[in-house]
Image (cartoon, grey):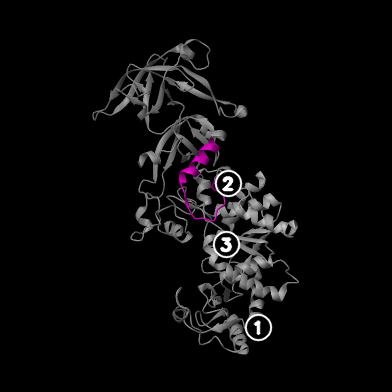
Amino acid sequence: MSEEKRSLNFIEQIIEEDLANGMKKENLRFRFPPEPNGYLHIGHTKAIGISFGLGEKYNAPVNLRFDDTNPAKEEQEYVDAIKEDVAWLGYEWKSECYSSDYFQQLFDWAVQLIKDGKAYVDSQTSEEMATQKGTPTEPGVASPYRDRSVEENLDLFNKMKNGDFEEGAHVLRAKIDMTSPNMLLRDPIMYRILKKAHHRTGNDWVIYPMYDWTHGESDYIEQISHSLCSLEFKPHRDLYNWFRDNVYDYSKSEYPLAPKQREFSRLNLSYTIMSKRKLKKLVDDGIVTGWDDPRMPTISGLRRRGYTPAAIRNFIDTVGVSKRENVIDVALLEFKIREDLNKNANRVMGVLNPVKLVITNYPEDQEEILIAENNPEIETAGSREVPFSRELYIEREDFKEEANKKYFRLTLGKEVRLKNAYIIKGESCIKDEEGNITEIHCTYDPLSKSGSGTEESKRRVKGTLHWVSIKHAATAEVRVYDRLFSEEAPDGHKDKDFMDFINPDSLKVINAYVEPSLKDANIADRFQFQRLGYFNVDKDTTQENLIFNKIVGLRDTWAKKNK
């Protein structure tokens, strides 16, 4: 087997086999079919990446289709958000499609199934249908309405369509096999009455097709060659094929290609909830500020947090395509954004927990401009000017009066370097009545300026601290995020609700000081705050209020914290 063949995932192997067996490459067509009942989340990126990735690999069209069959839960807001998310990830769809565009065709095919004795109107209650459907170990029994005449079924179905009945009075069911071991084949519902306005068709319809009936037939109408979905739909494949094959009898001249469904494992992520219903509860209950809250696993939340399309796509590529369900450590996603931003984010300095540092032998009225590299990983990134003065802010945790030999930050009697500036030596500190340090005094070596070429500038000390000049610093609000859930599997407990694992410390808002170059930063710009982590400018930023979101730290502290 060639190296290329060994590198193919199982879906690509299926496609290659189909091509080898006579399928024409120009007939390859894929789709990503979200239901517009919520915002896309990180779990959807795998399905997006697989379908659009195959489109790119085979130069085949990919449709973005909205399976919009439930007007009670679907909104235009979600349609718009999904389109924005897919485009932001860098994918282009061939056609924008809606299952609602096919409502008339689906109705006509349903009428034909009734005429062929393959569908009937059932007037049982939902409770009665659930009882007569049986169990996984016991066969179902026929509905008392299963043998209605074709004429009666057509009359009732048309009256359902015309709005003559209330919700729940009747449903249309496919007539398949009430004894099938696959319970999905025990006369599944095809249509129900829903007297609710649809976000696209308005009040044109009061009956709406069920997902299983709509989804496969939409694939068929669009001539999708390979219908790719997650593993929970594997039991649906027999039903998918039954609907497809029966409709194929009516329309094979118009739609010659019969799609095939194949399944892959979902993307499950630790410390994360993937259910749109449960994510909506977080929004509705005010646990988060909205669907794009940076703690949410939604694509819009990740985008606002500062994640990049490249990092997410690399994450999906690394996870790969498999048939077996597993849970991916969220640390892998965090690694991918660190990897991307390390190469692409400019370095700046900001102090999140400030304490005042005074260089006592630096002239009081002196200021100077230092030159700092924007990103040493990029030759063309250039440099910026950073003002320096006698009084600075450093991080409070970067100073101790006394420390052991393993402490390489500032302490009394020892030296450290200020990033891009001078070597300083701790001399004394001032405390308030409670014993808190309010001011640190130090001296500097004027000949030790970074990059000056002097012997002193080349002198090595073990610690380097970031800082900002108090006189020039810009104030900023910094939103420091942690994981929204404190439990690795918040949805995996029988005796507890996922809401029981909300991390109360998932957001801390602090006031910080940053170097003045950041006053000109634009919304969504990303930076590495040296020694602290990666941050981006939040959309709430105004000219008067600069706001940063912490994207991720420089290293994974979660595993260490939970040992």
Eye-nearest disc, 3 or 2 = 2
- Secondary element at image label 3: helix
Near mark 1 (Cα within 10 A), the count class, few <14, some 14-19 or many ≥20, is few
* Marks 2/1: CA–CA distance: 47 Å
Look at label 3 and name its amino acid: Gln
Residue nearest the viewer, comparing 490 with 452: 490
Look at label 1 and name its amino acid: Asp
Question: Residue 56 appears at what percent x and percent y?
Answer: 68, 50
Question: Residue 412 appears at what percent x and percent y?
Answer: 32, 19
Look at label 2 and name its amino acid: Asp
Give residue 116's mark.
Answer: 1
Q: Quadrant of the C terminus?
A: top left
- Secondary element at image label 2: helix
Residue drawn at x 47%, y 11% is 456
Residue drawn at x 41%, y 44% is 482
Residue nearest the viewer, comparing 352 with 157: 157
Residue 21 in the magenta stretch? The answer is no
Task: Provide the residue designation for mark 2.
Answer: 317
Q: Earlier in the sequence, mark 1 or mark 3?
A: 3
Question: Residue 68 appears at what percent x and percent y?
Answer: 58, 66
Residue drawn at x 66%, y 80% is 112
Give residue 543's mark.
Answer: none
Instruction: Let me know if residue 84 appears in the view.
Output: no
Residue 326 in the magenta stretch? The answer is yes
Which region of the structure is painted magenta? 317-341
Question: Residue 348 appears at what percent x and percent y?
Answer: 50, 30
Task: Provide the residue designation for mark 3.
Answer: 76
